[in-house]
Image: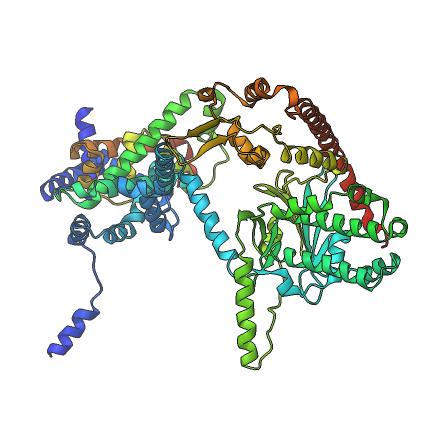
Amino acid sequence: MKIYTKKYELLSAYVDDELSDTEIRKLEDELRFSKDLQEKLDDLKRVKKLTSKSVKSVPENHYFDTRVSAAIRNDGPWLFRIRKYIPVVGIVALSIALMVVLKVNPGIINSLLERQKSNISEFYTQNLKPLLYAADLTNEDIFNFAFYHQLPLDNQKSQYLLLGTGQNGSQFCEIKSNYKFNNTNNLDKFVKGLNLNAIQKQQVDSILSNYAIDLQSQVLVNEKNTVAINSNIWNYNKALIADLVSFAARANKEEMRNVLPAGFDSYYNNGSVARLVNEVRSENGNKYIFITPDTIFSDSFNFDKEKFSQDMKKLNEEMKKMNKSGENFSFNFHMDSNFVNKTKIPSYNGQFKIYVDSNSCLIHLPQVFVPQIQIPNLDSMSANIGKAADLFRSFSFNFPEMSKGKNFNYKYFYSDSGKGYNFNFRVFGLDSTFNFKNHKMDSMFGKNFRRFNFNSPDSLKGFYKSFFGDSTAFNQREIEKELQQVQRQLELFQKQMDKLQKQFPKNEKHLKSSKSVEI
Amino acid sequence: MKNKKKKTELQLPQILNLDDDFSLIKRFIEGDESTFNLLVVRHKEKVRNIIYLTLNNHELVDDIAQEVFLTVYKNLGRFRFESQFTTWLYRITINKCKDHLRKIKIRSIFTSIKDEEEDFGYSTSPDEKDVAEIVRKAIDQLPEKLKIPLLLKDIEGLSYQEIAESIQCEIGTVKSRIFRAREGLRNILKPYEKELM
């Protein structure tokens, strides 16, 4: 069987043409005499034919080499493979580096932000000019600023800066484009309503002109479409109202009630307008809100009013020499469309809540942003305080006339300065010696009198008493009484201040509703 | 005369020979990776056919052929030029096919008996009329070690030497396996003798 199998294998190889010439000759000799081998050869040839015809080639794939190239790129050498991870590795490496940097120098982000902020600030704060210069504000505009809380930003009066106070007491400002203000001639109505004479009219104009000058540094604009609003402007508004209401009360109290709405009572019921105005003006208002086409931020900015005035004067003189009239730059505020799109929903920009659309930009300020200057009612106290102060000023020792021959002399000089006291009681008119101004007395109270056998002016009084009996006019009781009175007045003042603090937001709310009231 | 000779040389078609594969491999080893694509273009159809014949599944052809060329790409730098490139390539191809068949075998352990019966149901189908299909399915019934040398010989036309190198065995073994494959095939096809005549 094994022999046959070997023969058949040779036959199979013969069919495949895989035999050597010798093997072929040998096998062909055997085939001639073996029918069995011939049949087997036929079988093998038939099977080979069937096999060869049974299988068709797989359809050609023209994109196979491209596919292999792509696979090689994705599964190439490690350097090739790692390439696709480079972005991820890069991000991870950057994150780690950032973490290390922040760990080593935690303030770096803040300093970068500060630098960025300072760059932005520097860009937008260049060449800022007062609004008055840009928009040619009239007294009517200033008057409307007082009672309607709005200022035109341009000469065409199509853009307005609106100021207001929200229900929670926080302030807001808004820049409105395509805004029409229909209430005109309000100043004229005010003048006529109060039946003011020519002098009084001049006084009103004078008040408004003064505030116009002050408002110069309160609202600044530049050609980069920046509007800078001083945080103290809300207080200026209060002071201006108080000034105008106070004036109206003095000029025509009866008619004033018909001209002004009830909401302004809080302004004219107190007579401390001057005090309020002084306080507002003394406020160091260098904190500005910068509204720019693409951002809103707050920063400190010192506007040199004097320098600006001098520059303008110089410019006008040069223009005159050249026979040219000075041209105001035209201001037309518009927000960047990207910024508008970004802030279609209310957004918080650090401290401000901002609402922006194509025609307006509304900014809500945090309550702490505007310096809170309240309207105090100091009238009743001021007289008493003044009186007490007068008593202090006239505080003196009175010595009785001394007979000649009685004399004693105290001298004391400080070793560390040229100052000293020389009490020569031989000289008459000792009153003049002690009738010093307060500050001199104060300096005396702080000194050490031990060297003179008395510790304080009280013991000095005792000392004199031993010499002159009870004749000294050292009215201690009266001073104590006055001091107690001052104490009481100060406590009362404190209570009133607290009360005002609580009432003020309500008054402001009143003030807001007064927009609808015709003057 | 010289010009005529030059023209004749230029007009000669580029005939591929063994040196061509070797020169391409050398260039690849020297760093010219673009030559690998030429090798792929030149041998892809042969490789794909071997896979198709071995697995009888055209859906797997490109995936396994891709694996084959990736293996070649990774190992071409270590090619020793001791045998033909095609022999080495076919060996890799056959091994990849064997790996795949091994995986299928392992998977089949976890498949249901019903499925297995369905897979081999064709062998008794009396309605089978297509001769090529009958033979193809008969070949599939052969064991891998017989089927592969038979197909490499009868379909791909490889020599016994090439087959021996590809499947890593002796030439005598190849000779024996091919004969046994034919014998087996003849026995399987006996019931269809009439259809096959």
Q: Looking at the figure, which quarter contains the N terminus of chain A?
A: top left
Closer to us: A14 or A91: A91
Q: Looking at the figure, which quarter contains the C terminus of chain A?
A: bottom right
- Residue found at the very far front of the displayed protein: A405
Residue B152: x and y in percent read: 27, 40
Q: Is residue A15 visible?
A: no
Closer to us: A109 or A330: A330
Q: Is residue A249 visible?
A: yes
Residue B160: x and y in percent read: 19, 39
Task: Count up the numbered dots.
Answer: 0
- Residue found at the very far left of the displayed protein: A22
Residue B184: x and y in percent read: 31, 30
Residue at 87% from the left image edge and 61% from the top image edge = A192
Give left or right: position of A221 versus A495. left
Closer to us: A389 or A404: A404
Picture quarter containing residue A100?
top left
